[in-house]
């Protein structure tokens, strides 16, 4: 899952975003194909199908989302230029500031599937976890794990003791600063559920991240928003980070009629985050919808959550029911 390598140039323009899901019938180990993001560093860009300006990698990624045929993009930080479907040569950029991001469906042949797994092509819904593995039953806080098709073209090795992955952590099992893995590949309909109590008088924060430590979504809750020692208001800040670039215009939801602030220090809350589309997450607090938020990278790239500060977690479910 951590392989990052340049792809042949001829592949860049033929990539597509389809999500192909495979599941097994014999021993219940799910085999899943999904899209991956590759970070091709230090490329020399000679042009692009569409060339425009952008303020950051975040903005360039969002422009790619709006361009119906975009499967790769590059951002020149020095000039603020965004290349969609970039043309490159073999030379590296002189200052290393240009990186190309692209998506590809890994190809794993069924003939290379481990011998104890029989694979058939099928569409699997989020709730269809009726896998039965010989002599393996997942506990109530665990779920059957989806074996992944890796960028190498080989199926991920899954041993019997890796069939079950933890999806629920209860009070006393969760600590700040620790990374908790999402047990499968998120996609449309995926939902996480967090029950917690703010313990900091100022803020609590957590990140949903990918394997390259890009922050697909940062949720930063300011129970009391201070600037230069002055109290302004209560506010929710939603942002993303690709490489070293934060979004230049984060979503700031100030307490008011449009976004009544639903968090208070010492008061328990229930937060659900649901993937509405590949690039849109809906946040629900104590039942009602709080906000819909657009992210620059697909939900399929998210692999874990990191809780940073200011929160006592009573329950964390990274694969809860929608």
Image (cartoon, rainbow, N blue to C red):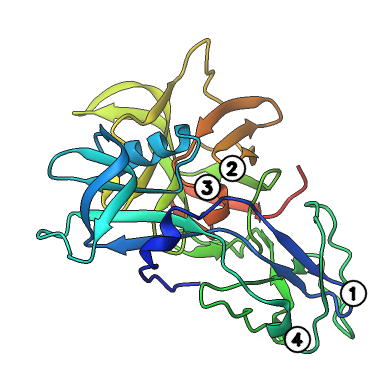
Between the C-alphas of marks 4 and 3, the distance is 30 Å
Q: Residue 42 at x, y = what percent?
A: 21, 62
Q: For marks 2 and 1, give the CA distance.
A: 29 Å
Give the distance between the C-alpha atoms of the residues marked 4 and 2, in whole angstroms: 31 Å
Which tag, 4 or 2, sits closer to the chain's start?
A: 4
| Nearer-the-camera pick, 226 or 212 | 212
283 shown above or below 100: above
Dot 1: what SS? loop
How packed is label 2: few (under 14 Cα within 10 Å), some, or many (20 or more)? some
Say which element carries label 4.
Answer: helix
Which-is-in-front pick, marks 3 and 1? 3
Q: How many marks?
A: 4
Determine contact: label 4, label 3, CB under 8 Å.
Answer: no
Quarter occupied by the C terminus: top right
Residue 18 is situated, as x and y percent measured from the top left of the image, at: 63, 51
What residue is shown with label 4? Answer: 160
Q: Which residue is mark 3?
A: 298
- Viewer-nearest of discs 4 and 2: 2
Q: Earlier in the sequence, mark 3 or mark 1?
A: 1
Which residue has dot 2 on it?
A: 278
> SS of the residue at dot 3?
loop
- Do the CB atoms of the residues marked 2 and 3 lie less than 8 Å apart? yes
Nearest to viewer (mark 4 / mark 3): 3
Q: Badge 1 is on which residue?
A: 132
In the picture as drawn, the residue positioned furthest to the bottom comes out as: 115
Q: Is residue 162 visible?
A: yes
Tags 4 and 1 touching, CB below 8 Å:
no
The quadrant in which residue 121 appears is bottom right
Relative side of 42 to 60, left or right: left
């Amino acid at each position: 899952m951590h392989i990052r390598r340049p792809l042949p140039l001829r592949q860049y323009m033929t990539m597509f975003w389809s999500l192909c899901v495979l599941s097994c019938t014999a021993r219940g180990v799910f085999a899943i194909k999904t899209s991956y993001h590759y970070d091709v560093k230090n490329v020399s860009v000679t042009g692009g199908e569409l060339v425009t300006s952008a303020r950051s990698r975040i903005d360039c990624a969002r422009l790619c989302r709006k361009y119906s045929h975009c499967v790769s993009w590059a951002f020149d930080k020095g000039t603020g230029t965004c290349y969609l479907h970039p043309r490159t040569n073999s030379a590296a950029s002189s200052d290393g500031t240009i990186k190309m991001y692209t998506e590809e469906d890994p190809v794993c042949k069924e003939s290379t599937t481990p011998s104890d797994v029989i694979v058939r092509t099928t569409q699997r819904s989020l709730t269809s976890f009726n896998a039965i593995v010989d002599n393996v039953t997942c506990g109530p806080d665990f779920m059957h794990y989806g074996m992944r098709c890796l960028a190498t073209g080989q199926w991920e090795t899954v041993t019997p003791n890796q069939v079950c992955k933890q999806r629920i952590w209860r009070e006393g099992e969760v600590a700040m600063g620790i990374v908790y893995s999402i047990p499968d590949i998120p996609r449309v309909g995926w939902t996480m559920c967090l029950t917690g109590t703010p313990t900091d008088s100022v803020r609590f924060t957590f990140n949903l991240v990918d394997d390259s430590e890009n922050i697909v979504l940062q949720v930063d809750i300011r129970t009391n928003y201070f600037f230069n020692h002055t109290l302004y208001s209560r506010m929710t800040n939603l942002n993303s980070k690709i490489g070293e670039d934060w979004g230049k215009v984060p979503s700031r939801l100030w307490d008011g009629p449009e976004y009544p602030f639903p968090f208070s220090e010492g008061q328990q809350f229930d937060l659900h985050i649901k993937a509405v589309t590949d690039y849109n997450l809906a946040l629900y607090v104590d039942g009602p919808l709080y906000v819909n938020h657009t992210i620059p990278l697909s939900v399929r790239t998210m692999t874990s959550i990191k809780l940073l500060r200011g929160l006592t977690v009573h329950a964390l479910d990274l694969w809860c029911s929608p």
